[in-house]
Amino acid sequence: MSSDAPNLAAAARQVHDVDPTTPAPTAEQVRSLQQLEAVWRKPRGLVGFLTTTNHKDIGLRFVYTAFVFFFLAGLLALAIRVQLAVPNNTLLGPDLYNQFFTTHGSAMMFLFAVPVMEGMAIYLVPLMVGTRNTCFPRLMSYGYWVYLMGGITLFIALALNFGPDMGWFSYTPLAGPDYSPGKRVDFWSQMVTLVEIGSMSGAIATITTILKCRAPGMALNRIPLFVWAALVAAFMILFAMPAVTICSTLLSMDRLSHVSTHFFNHAEGGDHLLWQHLFWFFGHPDVYIIFLPATGFISAIIPTFARRKIFGYTPLVLSMIAIGFIGFGVWVHHMFVTPIPELGQGMFTASSLLITIPTGVQIFCWTATLWLGRPWLKSPLLFVLGFFGVFIMGGLTGVMIASVAVDTQAHDTFFVVAHLHYVLIGGMIFPLLGAILYWFPKWTGKMPGETLAKWSLALLFIGTNLTFYPLHHLGMGGMPRRIYTYLPETGWQPLNMLATLGAFTMGIGFLIFVINLWLSSRRGAPAGPNPWHAGTLEWATTSPPSTYNFANPPTCEGRDPVWDNSPDAAIVTNLDTDKREVLCTTTLDAQPHHRYEMSGDSWWPLVVAIATTVIFVAGFGFTPSWILPGCAILAIGLGAWFWVSAYRSLAVHHPEMPRDPRKD
Amino acid sequence: MMQPRATIDASKLPDHAWDAHAPLWWGNLLLVFVETTSMALLFATYFYVRRNFHEWPPPRINEMPPIVHPVPHLAAATFNTILLLASCLPMYWTDMAARRIDRKKVILGLLLMIGVGVISSLLRWREFYDVHFRWDENAYGSIVWTMLGLHLIYILTGIAEFGLMAAFAARHGFEEKHALDVTLMGGFWYWLAGIWVITYVIIYWYPRWS
Amino acid sequence: MIARRVLIFALALLAVGCTGEQAALNPAGAQAGRITSLWWLICWTCVVVYVLTIGAIVIGVVRKRRRADEPDAPAPPTTRPDPAREHRARIIVAAAVGVTVVILFVFMFSDFTAGRALASLAGDKSALTIKITGHQWWWEARYEDSTTSNTFTTANEIHIPVGRTIEFQLESADVIHSFWVPRLHGKKDMIPGHSTRTYLKADKPGVYYGQCAEFCGHQHANMRLVIIAQPHEEFESWRTAQIRPAGEPPFDNLKRGRDVFLKNSCVMCHTIRGTTAGGRLGPDLTHVGSRKLLASNIIPNKPGHLAGWILDPQKIKPGVRMPQNALDPHDLRALLEFLESLK
């Protein structure tokens, strides 16, 4: 985390790091660094906490919050596994069980997987492209607040025994007004709306930062692969998330007693398959929105620990873009057992198989990088190896159920539960934990402990397989998903017991992982700016980075600037130090173009987030009369948001700038 | 004596950009992506729901005399379409004035655009009554009201932006960095008019053809 | 010895998908059989692919890894790789992608062929039509017949003739359910507002279990289904029996039981053909005594279980639509005898 106090020594050291041949900083340099510190410093205490717009604060805040929700959802998963360990178990009963599995799925997908990836992108992207903050700092801060409020909405509902109980996919008519009276579904749908508004805000900030604020010289074909992944995932968010906000809003309008539209009421011409189409049009791309940043982590970790440049940069980038497109063409494979025309099914089988090809290209390129390099078996790389072991299994079962015929048997059974957990745990958790170990030195300045990391990896790997491998067999043995119990006659008990033991093994693994980070952050060895001797720009600054990341933003002479840059590579100088200024470069070639002032810390994102929450949770969730007051606060908040920055950019505040003669 | 290392002197670069080089331009474009996707999904919903009806819109039989083919009335919507398309001209004029940093004309143009927005919203009010069905009568009513309503929200957003910019320009002045804001408002308004033409054809003409 | 026992136990565990009485890979009908053979083709191919890929990765990592005794600093990064080795790697990667594409084409082709084969039953003119309606949380089965009087309704236990194509017309009365009997065929959703069909054929007599596969609320877990495949004659005699309405009870006690049924809330939801009971919300009970299981096939049809079910169904299936019933013990006994007599 960034330090609040001016840290001149660090700043001076940073100039040294960029160019060790530079003599000690002059008095003027020190003064300008002091000014830079002052301009970028966030206010102290609670005020600073509530108003900060620094990407490192907000990125880490996304990550921490997501892990809190992950922990809670994980506890729910353990309860689910205990309930299923023996037949005819009455521990939870159907009502609690249904709330638990719905909240588990919803929290993992909406509150953990997507936000944690966005958090990592928000933290890493400005560092990796060599700039000082994301382009729209207040929008990003707003994104965090609405996400937080969405998440709190869901868990408050669960704590009050109002947790949603219709499944994270919320199919109508079960989720409609007739079969889910009460407010349970409304809490869920407003949570979804808020969280996805947050995702879209974050995505807009990320994309613009990547397109406009890259270090001079970082042309499109030199962007680090993680940044490419974040870019494609953010674009997918822009096109996928509107589908889920639209369908959750349509659902809440159907459910609101004074509104009562009929989108999902077949008696009045509505359609239940419409819900499924809209939901999965978001739902499947969502999987790739989660998976692509994970491939970015892998593409960052493998070259560092294979000690060579990545093999197949261009194919890897093209694969990510291909996944981004094909990901929008596979949603119907969630609906193979609904009445869909046969031709349609065939097309979606073909596209579901097709998406294997770019994924295969990625895996082969990573394998080649390992073969051609000299692997240095540190814990981040070991987690990536764990990814291979688990994810490829899930990918292959995915190929199996891309076949319509096979899917009619596997669909909605524990086979699919096994498949999706292999894909998500393998494809997302393992790379994410690896990435956290990999960048831990950057954000704490301390090295993570190796021994405990290896223990946690071993337990997680064994636990994952122990939990989810048996579920393949249970699924083909006829056990459907989302059942709160089963009969002893089915013979499903031993494998279920095994899975429950596995779940606890995983739990211990996660616990050790967290303990390791906690211990390392207290007494880990000092890391220095680049402990892994890696090649991307985040390693060209101090650990942890200063609030402004780079005193003199670097330039880029290759795909791995730290490895490729010549010793006298240029640096960017003379950015204004009396405001938060960054350099904007051209979109394709990253040639310096103009200076851009970033907005400072602000209360308005929080105000606007509260207004959004009032509109959706109170208005769409309970009674429409809350919508107008909410909109009023929203208008005031957004007005002030605009006004403040328009006022700040008046030339009168920047007297050193030459004024335009036409205005006099 | 060492050679001073190569530097890129940022102070020589301009402190703003007006076009696709500006981050705000991109942010705006991306928001328009989101809004376009939202509208497109509503269009898809419209045609999806249509398959559940023999007649589109369904005959209105719960009043006397029954209306066999209750297509929405054209007058208000057609006038609204013409108004929105025509309003692109004063918007463009305002944008050009903004690029010349002509504060008075910008304020005048924005006030004109606010007028357009208000008239368009009033016409939209009329359009809701022209649909023949309330939103809670059947899925046809639901989707048409939602499409009209979402577009109305965009119009209101536009009015709010114009009002805010005009008030700021009147109160504090108008400088080069603000010109981009007006340009982006223009982009949003052209988009709004364009997407309305599609919406108009779908809601008002498609039922007459099918 | 212990090792061998553990091995046997492990194998028995893993056989769950292939041998259980509800196992998809233990087919008893043409459709499930077709899917099973496609399944094994894809499955074994995937196993081979998995082993090869993981093998390549492990070898790649182990072969040239940094040894523990090497100095602390990592090797300097290779930023200008050897062109010859790069070229070789490119060829190998391209070849691997090519093999992937070929495998995917094989999968796609075999899936389409399997889809054709599965659809071929749909044209069978001699098919027996059964209309299944999903309810929260039980199955209504209506046997269609060209003679209206031969049409009858039953619930949860579905008898079919062996060797004849059955056309299931699937509907839902409330939320989405999914009709699934793994040993006979894959599942098909029952969506309100959409009627769907599925065709299957049992190759050998037997009892085939299934259950609702789409989450449908509280008692989704206990919405079980039984298909009993019988030789033609047996099926016809069952059918003839089912068509008959319930007769006049021969004994006073049974008459009393019938009156208890008719005077209590039972009639609000249940039908017993031949009596005035005509409720349509719950299962048809005209021949409830002939069924082997109760409560959507989760408890045996024995007087004790039936009594428990009637008195407090919420205890057995929390959330079920059937209310608790407070009955006088004599009335209860009479009611039980009456219901069990409805063969």
Image (spheres, coloured by chain):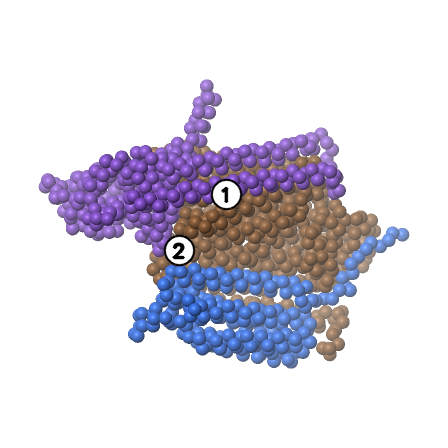
Chain colours: A brown, B blue, C purple
Quarter of the image where one finds residue C159: top left
Reading the image, the residue beneath label 1 is: C108
Quarter of the image where one finds residue A659: bottom right
User: Could you tell me which quadrant the C terminus of chain A lies in?
Assistant: bottom right
Front residue of A306 and A340: A340
> How crowded is the residue under tag 1: few (<14 C-alpha within 10 Å), some, or many (20+)?
many
Front residue of C231 and A192: C231
Front residue of C260 and A268: A268
* C305 lies above or below C133: above
Q: Helix, strand, or loop for circle 2? A: helix
Q: Residue at x 16, y 51 (%)?
A: C276
Q: Where is residue C57 in the image (x, y as percent from the top left)?
A: 62, 35
Amino acid type of the residue tagged 1 in the rendering: Met
Q: Helix, strand, or loop for circle 1? A: helix
Residues at circles 2 and 1 in contact by the CB criterion of under 8 Å = no
Q: Distance between the residues labelled 2 and 1?
A: 29 Å
Q: Position of residue A628 (x, y in %)?
A: 46, 69
Q: Which residue is drawn at 55% across and 51% down?
A: A326
- The chain identifier of the residue carrying mark 2 reads A
Reading the image, the residue beneath label 2 is: A272
Q: Residue at x 44, y 71 (%)?
A: B204
User: Can residue C271 be seen here?
Assistant: no
Left or right: where does residue B111 sit relative to residue A401?
right
Q: Which residue is at the far top? A: C1
Amino acid type of the residue tagged 2 in the rendering: His
Front residue of A90 and C67: C67
* A322 lies above or below A81: below
In front: label 2 or label 1 = 1
Q: Position of residue B10 (x, y in %)?
A: 76, 61
Q: Position of residue A400 (x, y in %)?
A: 49, 40
